[in-house]
């Protein structure tokens, strides 16, 4: 069959706690940095918050039935750290833990394999008040939280992801200030980045020490970096930005050190690297999670961050303004296999936002999304043929949700969320994806 995928390939969808759960202040949940940030005027488009979001906290059984109807083999969700540990450490909120226990049980009963991300950006505000990720103590608290989750859910849940997109946490949250906590400091950004490496390492260590069965990895957003021209200064700028966006994460994980050229540039702004930190980051992972959305075109621009100007490519754009560049997917997948010898690769996010509407027939027709997914899955099939060990694909996202600083203005779901009634309407892309799953491959 054309485009057939390997037996046992996991076809899934992905979501994140703050983006879908709602119940932001119910059942003993603590405040997160996104609760605080979204309630700060001017931070999120239209003043949107995740207070209700998709109300998944109350509607999770309906949502699991929806996943079952689609034929999903896997579901990637995230645990809200402040729902389980309201202050980030210490007193456990049993009601919060019970929610995730019920969710995991429902998924297993539906024969959907759960993949849990321990951190998808909603840091407990109490830890932020003590310095957040730039404070090394946050990494220690994360290790303790991870150990708790392995203890509580590890008898049934066997797929764990430590962090989601640490680059975004550090850069977009602490240097650019677009995401929570909304800071703009290179020093904070670099400290956060380093402590995220330490945190992930502590979680992996805790998992190994727990003796629980299963696998653990990390999810990073990576992108092909292409120079704007073949001028020497643009080539050098593209290399610098590649070291920041891609290698700042990959090199410590797989090589035990930061990329040396960029480290030399940033050395006087770096936090203290304690003995053993890079060994923690460099522990063997069972898999790597890749999030891919677009490529970046880079030129030399003195005075900008790393003397680089970073833009999207010239191709067709999604509603978010992101270039549709499926070839970049193949480029990144093959690079991970070739340069980092990744043995098990999960594609933990890939998807697109378009201006979806309910049509007069009551359906949601989204041909652009189907075309996007078809083009990107063709590149996954191509990578598999080239020998890249891809084990599963998690489409972003199951349903329209709170899209961070963009609020509810961007729809990434294959299921339409009517935010007035919270009704879920599977889009044409959901029906298409169900067919892909059923045939284990593209038409």
Image (tube, rainbow, N blue to C red):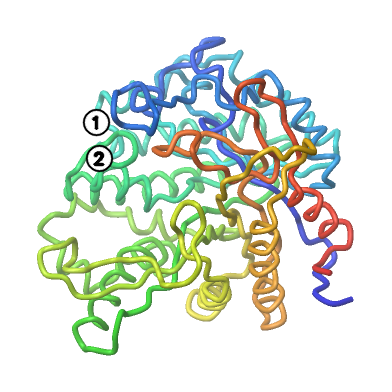
Q: Quadrant of residue 382?
A: bottom right
Q: Residue at x 53, y 66 (%)?
A: 324
Q: Which residue is mark 2?
A: 134
Name the disc covering residue 131, or none.
Answer: 1
In this orientation, which residue lies closer to the viewer: 106 or 153?
Answer: 106
Identity of the residue drawn at 51% across and 35% down: 146
Closest to the observer: 155 or 64?
Answer: 64
Relative to 183, is 51 above or below? above
Q: In the drawing, does residue 367 fall left or right of residue 165?
A: right
Is disc 1 surrounded by few (<14), some (14 to 19) or many (20+) residues within 10 Å?
Answer: some
Q: Do the numbered discs 1 and 2 sit on residues whose CB atoms are within 8 Å?
A: yes
Quadrant for the C terminus in the image: bottom right
The Cα–Cα distance between marks 1 and 2, rounded to whole angstroms, is 6 Å
199 sits to left or right of 99: left
Q: Quadrant of residue 143?
A: top left
Q: x and y percent of residue 138 in the render? A: 33, 34
Total labels: the figure holds 2
Looking at the rendered structure, the secondary structure element under dot 1 is loop
Residue at position x 68%, y 18% in the image: 58
* Mark drawn on residue 304: none
Q: Provide the secondary structure element on which disc 2 rests.
A: loop
Residue 137: x %, y % from top left:
30, 34
Across and down, in percent, residue 282 comes to 43, 61
């Amino acid at each position: 069959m054309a485009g057939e995928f390997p037996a046992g390939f996991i076809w899934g969808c992905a979501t994140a706690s703050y983006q879908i759960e709602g119940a932001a202040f119910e059942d003993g949940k603590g405040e997160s940095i996104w609760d605080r940030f979204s309630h700060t005027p001017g931070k999120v488009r239209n003043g949107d918050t995740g207070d209700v979001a998709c109300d998944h906290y109350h509607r999770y059984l309906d949502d699991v039935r929806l996943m079952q109807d689609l034929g999903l083999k896997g579901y990637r969700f995230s645990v809200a750290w402040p729902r389980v540990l309201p202050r980030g450490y210490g007193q456990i909120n049993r009601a919060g833990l019970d929610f995730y226990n019920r969710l995991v049980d429902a998924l297993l009963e539906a024969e959907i394999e759960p993949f849990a991300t321990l951190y998808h950006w909603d840091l407990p505000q109490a830890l932020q008040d003590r310095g957040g990720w730039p404070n090394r103590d946050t990494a220690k608290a994360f290790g303790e939280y991870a150990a708790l989750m392995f203890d509580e859910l590890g008898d049934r849940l066997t797929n764990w992801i430590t962090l989601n997109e640490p680059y975004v946490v550090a850069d977009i949250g602490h240097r650019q200030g677009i995401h929570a906590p909304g800071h703009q400091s290179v020093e904070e950004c670099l400290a956060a980045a380093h402590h995220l490496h330490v945190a992930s390492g502590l979680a992996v260590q805790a998992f190994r020490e727990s003796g629980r069965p299963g696998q653990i990895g990390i999810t990073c957003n990576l992108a092909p970096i292409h120079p704007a021209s073949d001028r020497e200064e643009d080539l050098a700028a593209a290399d610098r930005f590649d070291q920041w966006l891609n290698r700042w994460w990959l090199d410590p994980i797989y090589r035990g050190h930061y990329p040396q050229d960029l480290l030399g540039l940033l050395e006087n702004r770096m936090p203290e690297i304690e003995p053993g930190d890079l060994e923690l980051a460099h522990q063997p992972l069972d898999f790597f999670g890749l999030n891919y959305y677009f490529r970046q075109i880079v030129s030399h621009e003195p005075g900008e961050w790393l003397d680089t100007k970073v833009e999207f490519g010239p191709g067709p754009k999604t509603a978010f303004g992101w270039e549709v560049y499926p070839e970049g997917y193949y480029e990144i997948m093959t690079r991970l296999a070739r340069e980092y010898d990744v043995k098990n690769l999960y594609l933990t996010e890939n998807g697109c936002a378009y201006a979806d509407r309910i049509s007069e027939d009551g359906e949601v027709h989204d041909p652009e999304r189907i075309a996007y997914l078809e083009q990107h899955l063709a590149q996954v099939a191509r990578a598999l043929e080239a020998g890249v060990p891809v084990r599963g694909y998690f489409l972003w996202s199951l349903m329209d949700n709170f899209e961070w600083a963009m609020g509810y203005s961007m729809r990434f779901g294959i299921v339409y969320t009517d935010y007035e009634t919270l009704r879920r309407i599977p889009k044409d892309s959901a029906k298409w994806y169900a067919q892909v799953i059923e045939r284990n491959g593209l038409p």
